[in-house]
């Protein structure tokens, strides 16, 4: 799975494409720690719109959560997920519910990038106040 990672207007954009597997999701999320000028205070938008989660299992989600716990304190504290299809939406909601007590980021799901950007900008304004 390919992913694109960039920072724009103090927002981290992590965009995945193609069929997802747990290794590529982990690699993409851990790679943000290597971005020049990275700050965990930057909100992140994870765009999963092109992903196909039909091969992802609950065990994969649990493995992902287990693998991210050791870097959770270095990751963004505000994360917006963008998903289009119902299956991916349901899997990301399952992940959010399973991760709530172990990965403390504030998470929200959206069906389009513009709504996600609006939400993270409102969170940035709240943090700046």
Image: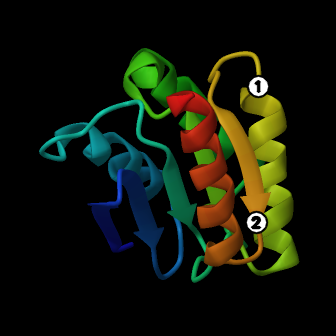
Q: Is residue 40 left or right of residue 6?
A: right
Relative to 90, does residue 87 appear above or below in the rendering?
A: below
Determine which quarter of the picture holds residue 30.
top left
Relative to 49, does residue 59 appear above or below in the rendering?
A: above
Relative to 77, does residue 86 appear above or below in the rendering?
A: below
Residue at image mark 2:
110
Q: Is residue 3 left or right of residue 45?
A: left
Percent from the top left, x then y, of residue 33?
26, 37
Q: Quadrant of the N terminus?
A: bottom left
Q: Distance from label 2 to label 1 (Cα)?
A: 18 Å
Depth check: give the residue in front, 95 or 15. 15
Q: Secondary structure at mark 2?
A: strand
Q: Secondary structure at mark 1?
A: loop
> Few, some or many C-alpha atoms within 10 Å of disc 2 (few <14, some 14-19, many ≥20)?
some
Depth check: give the residue in front, 20 or 9. 9
Q: Residue at x 39, y 22 (%)?
A: 71
Percent from the top left, x then y, of residue 45?
53, 58
Percent from the top left, x then y, of residue 26?
42, 46
Residue at image mark 1:
100
């Amino acid at each position: 799975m390919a992913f694109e990672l960039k920072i724009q207007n103090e927002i981290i954009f992590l965009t995945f494409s193609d069929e997802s597997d747990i290794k590529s999701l982990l690699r993409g999320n851990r790679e943000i720690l290597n971005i020049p000028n990275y700050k965990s205070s930057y909100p992140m938008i994870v765009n999963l719109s092109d992903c196909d989660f039909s091969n992802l299992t609950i065990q994969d989600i649990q493995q992902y959560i287990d693998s991210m716990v050791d870097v959770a304190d270095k990751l963004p504290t505000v994360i917006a997920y963008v998903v289009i299809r119902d299956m991916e939406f349901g899997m990301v909601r399952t992940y959010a519910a399973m991760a709530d007590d172990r990965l403390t980021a504030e998470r929200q799901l959206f069906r389009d990038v513009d709504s996600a950007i609006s939400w993270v900008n409102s969170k940035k304004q709240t943090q700046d106040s």
